[in-house]
Amino acid sequence: MRKTSSVPLLLFALTLFAGIVVAYSLYDTVGVNTAFAAFVAAFVAGALLARAVQVAAAWDRAIVLRLGKFHGLRGPGVFGIVPIVDTIPYWIDTRVIASTFRAEKTLTRDTVPVDVDAVLFWKVIDPERAALAVADYEAAISWAAQTALRDVIGKTMLADMLEGREKISGDLRTIIDARTEPWGIQVISVEVRDVLIPSGLQDAMSMQAQAERERQARVILGDSERQIAEKFSDAARAYAHDPTALHLRAMNMLYEGLKQNSTIVLVPSTAVDSMQLGSTVGAVRLARELEQQEGVSH
């Protein structure tokens, strides 16, 4: 809401005060009627002066009509009009204005009801057209933005809407700017703030995302097992041509098992026969029993 300037009120007060002084001075010389007439004249002059002098803020533009026809734009600063003949029906704010708008329970292209909140940033670049081409440009912008939002939602899939808000914002800006350009209004940007979907669909999408993560985990696990199998296959081919290396690997495995204070080590019989581990295992077992007996005797 535009704030009223104090300059016209000050001019009216000064003119009225001057009229009172003049009326008081005439009261003793020419009589009451003349003094009263002087006071009335000062009151009317003050009112006309206050009406004639207007002040517009730096961001305001006044639409001046003379006898009903467009006469011109006035402002910013102090300007004058002809009282009674000129009128100011509109004060146009030329600053950037932010307007919120939304679409409720609007079906997407894949028939999903969504609630979308957005913010529109716009400004008046032609005050004359904004005042004369449309009755209420602020309400017209609001309705244009809402209808454009519903049109875009109806042509967009839900997945694209959730992932591509920048594209939706760009489409909305283009549509709204094309509709408001004849009114002298420029759309600076449109920002989609939030997209709300039904709670049941949210649960389903959450379950779908969880299932997708589990599938990816199983794929990664399977790929890891395949890589391990390939490494084992490469090791088997290496050991097949080097029995000594295989024997050393078997001894290392046996050592790793015994150093954990294990009393029983399970070795496949085929490994015992092929790697000649029978004597080695027996020797190690005998050595451990002797150590235990010595510990008891001490």
Image: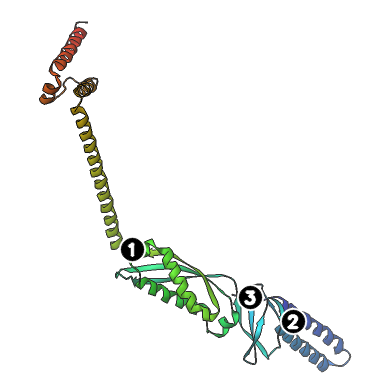
Q: Which mark is residue 60?
A: 3
Q: Earlier in the sequence, mark 2 or mark 3?
A: 2
Task: Determine which quarter of the picture holds residue 175.
Answer: bottom left
Q: Which residue is mark 2?
A: 12
**Mark 1 and mark 2 residues within 8 Å of each other at the beta carbon:** no
Q: What is the x, y in percent for residue 40?
A: 76, 90
Q: Which residue is mark 1?
A: 159
Residue at 39 percent across and 63 percent down: it is: 164
Question: Where is the C terminus found, in terms of image quarters?
Answer: top left
**Crowd band around label 1 with a 10 angstrom C-alpha radius: few (<14), some (14–19), many (20+):** few
> Is residue 225 rendered to the left or right of residue 179?
left
Tag nearer the camera, 2 or 3: 3
Given residues 200 and 290, the one toward you in this image is 290
| Callout 3 amino acid | Asp
Measured in 3D between alpha carbons, the distance from the residue under mark 1 to the one under mark 2, in whole angstroms, is: 64 Å
Measured in 3D between alpha carbons, the distance from the residue under mark 2 to the one under mark 3, in whole angstroms, is: 23 Å
Tag 2, which secondary structure? helix
| Callout 1 amino acid | Ala
View extreme (top): residue: 298
